[in-house]
Amino acid sequence: MPRYLIEREIPGAGRMTADELHAISAKSNQVLAGMAGRAQWVHSYVTDDAITCVYLAENADAVREHADCGGFPVTTIREVAAVIDPATGEPG
């Protein structure tokens, strides 16, 4: 399945409590359980005013469906073309 980066602008996201983060994570899991494997949450990064998520999904519409059903904002959805890391720059 393609990999996507989803940015969710949420003012004050970095000040969310552990209970608040648990609640939105549980809601995400609940929605994903009803999507018959069409989307999978890999992990997310919480910053000051946004949460950036990594998902595997059959397409961007599945990502939007997850957001709509969960009541999550979506600022951008970007399909990942490639993943690189320091080893990518090492001699072949």
Image (spheres, helix red, strand yellow):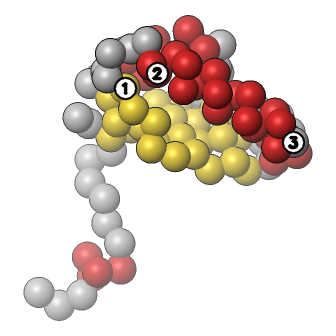
Furthest toward the left, the residue is 92
- Residue 62, by quadrant, is top left
Considering every residue shown, the one lying at the far bottom of the view is 91
Which residue is under mark 1? 39
Q: Amino acid at mark 3?
A: Thr
Question: Which amino acid does the dot numbered 2 rest on?
Answer: Leu
Can you give x and y, in whole percent of width and height, for residue 65 in the image?
Answer: 46, 12
C-alpha gap between disc 2 and disc 1: 7 Å
Judging from the image, what secondary structure is the residue with disc 2 in?
helix
Q: Nearer the viewer, residue 46 or 91?
A: 46
Q: Earlier in the sequence, mark 2 or mark 3?
A: 3
Residue density around tag 3, few if under 14, some if 14–19, many if 20 or more, within 10 Å = few
Q: Disc 1 to disc 3, how far (Cα)? A: 26 Å
Q: Are marks 2 and 1 in contact (CB under 8 Å)?
A: yes
Using the image, determine if residue 16 lies above or below residue 61.
Answer: below
SS of the residue under disc 1: strand
Q: Residues within 10 Å of mark 2 (few under 14, many from 20)?
A: many
Residue 9 vs 67, above or below: the answer is: below
Residue 79 in view of the camera: no
